Image (spheres, rainbow, N blue to C red):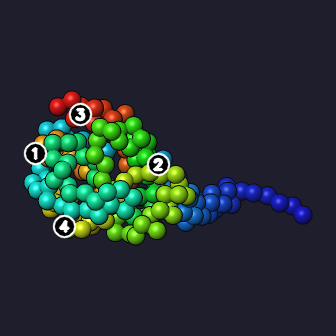
Amino acid sequence: MNFRINRKSISNIVFALVVLMLLYSPSREWFMRQMAFAPTSNIESTNNIGSYNWNLNGLNTKNLNFETLEDKVIFVNFWATWCPPCRAEMPMIQELYNDYKDKVAFVFVTNESWPTVNKFFQKNGYSLPVFNSASSPPKKLTETNSIPASYLIDKKGNIIIDKVGAANWSSNKVRNTIDKLLLE
């Protein structure tokens, strides 16, 4: 039996492997993580959230009146356990949270139940504070229906980073931006 592999066969095999990798959820998340770049910040932002009037029910933390976060640096992330880009960026967000949880207010918002989130957190070792909205979020945080949607807000309520899609939240670029905001 004479078995020969030509260029066309190799390219077909590579194409099939790429398609399979993108269809298989863990490899798709890995690929998205590799493609996630640091989000762009706008320190000169005049895009203010306007109102802090937002009540949140804590799933693994206390309930929160968003008004209590006024004058603080805030990281808000809308996400879901079933969302591949959300899952792809979660390890990087957990790293950021581990390093800044005492300096920055982190608000992770989902519409899922605690048993669903808890199972996902237990499987992946996450400890982020998760909330369900009890009232409507500030209008500036609802201008997209896509998830993940993340916002970095300065102490004056200006949206410094507004990112839809997976991002590298543990990058030096993001950390430097947060460090500057904390000094203001």
Amino acid type at image mark 3: Leu
Residue marked by disc 3: 182
Q: Residues within 10 Å of mark 3 (few under 14, many from 20)?
A: some
The quarter of the image holding the N terminus is: bottom right
Q: Are marks 3 and 2 in contact (CB under 8 Å)?
A: no
Label 3 or label 1, whichever comes before in sequence order: 1
Which residue is located at x 79 percent, y 58 percent? 4
- Disc on the earlier residue, 3 or 4: 4
Which kind of residue does numbered mark 2 sit on? Pro
Where does residue 145 sit, x and y in percent of width and height? 27, 67
Asked which secondary structure carries label 1, the reply is loop
Name the residue that disc number 4 marks.
Answer: 136
| Pointer 2 residue | 91
Q: Which of the two marks, 2 or 1, is nearer to us in this view?
A: 2
Q: Give the foreground label among 4 and 1.
A: 4
Residue highlighted by disc 1:
46
Place of residue 60 in the rendered image (x, y in percent of width and height, measured from the top left): 39, 58
Determine the CA span between mark 3 and mark 2. Answer: 23 Å
Q: Position of residue 155 (x, y in %)?
A: 16, 41
Dot 3 or dot 2: first in sequence order is: 2
